[in-house]
Amino acid sequence: MNIGTIIIGDEILSGKRRDQHLAKLIEMLAARGLTLSWARYVGDERARISETLAQAFASGDLVFSFGGIGATPDDHTRQAAADALGVPLALHPEARDLILSRIREMAAEQGEPYEPDRPDNARRLHMGVFPAGAAIIPNPYNKIPGFSVGHVHFVPGFPVMAWPMVESVLDGRYGHLHQDAAPRERSVLVFGSMESTLTPLMEEIETRFAPVKVFSLPSVDHPTHGRHIELGVKGRGELVDAAYAALRDGAAALGARLGDELVR
């Protein structure tokens, strides 16, 4: 199952805030032997968010969407998800109860009466309005839930809330996807050759050792190694070692000069 992420917010694209979710999601997946297949950044534009989410829903991939599920005018993710699905928005009954519980707690903490019908509290309930048919994702930080539709999961932009919510989804619904062994990489620095020369060899290795993947990372001005290509393979298990040996032998047979090996 491919895994993707959508990270939403003008503040990310403008540089006002630096995204932390991509690196953390990669880390959380790696801890479970999983890898990220794709990532997309989208600003606070409802039509573009809806288009991106429509692609995510249609893909069948496991997707985590970060941000934009609040109730302020610049939060469009809930509405865009409903647009993409062609369904109405509705107040989720369990989300309603959780939000009212949070409102009650906040009132007690501040020594104020519990007034769920007060305008500001009524607006808080908007955060429980999700596309019809959605399931909630519990939020251990403040009880304001995220939501799931199919394999697409929506969490807040705040890391302190979002990351535990993502982990709960990964370890609960997708525990069966976890792998005992993380993917591995083995690569070698190649000098005196060009990618066009190595490409047929790379294609041959991918065919012979599928599902191992071959990669090349050229560099033209490395401060230590100068012009070179990092040529390698990535995958799981012993097949990685066999593919790497064949790749090294093939590169040497093409006249390339092999340098240091890198293992990740």
Image (spheres, grey):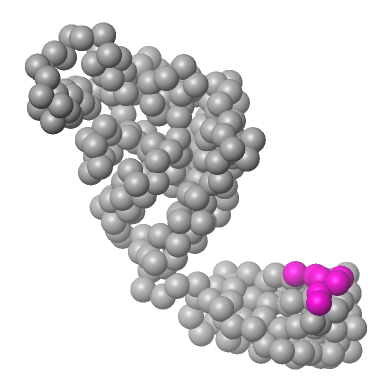
Residue 68 is left or right of residue 234, and the answer is: left
Q: Is residue 184 above or below residue 68?
A: below
Q: Is residue 192 left or right of residue 2?
A: right
- At 38% from the left and 21% from the top, the residue drawn is 71
Does residue 56 show up? yes
Q: Is residue 71 magenta?
A: no
Q: Quadrant of residue 118?
A: top left
Q: Which residues are magenta?
A: 217-223
Task: Residue 35: give x, y in percent of width and height.
Answer: 49, 61
Q: Quadrant of the C terminus?
A: bottom right
* Rendered location of residue 178, percent (x, y): 35, 64
The residue lying toward the viewer, choosing from 120 and 163, is: 120
Residue 219 falls inside the magenta stretch = yes
Which residue occupies the foreground of this view, 261 or 23?
23
Q: Point out the residue furthest to the front here.
A: 111
Can I make out residue 2 in this image? no
Q: Residue 200 location, x and y as percent? A: 81, 73
Q: Residue at x 36, y 60 (%)?
A: 177
Q: What's the residue at 31%, 50% (across, down)?
A: 164
Q: Is residue 123 left or right of residue 19?
A: left
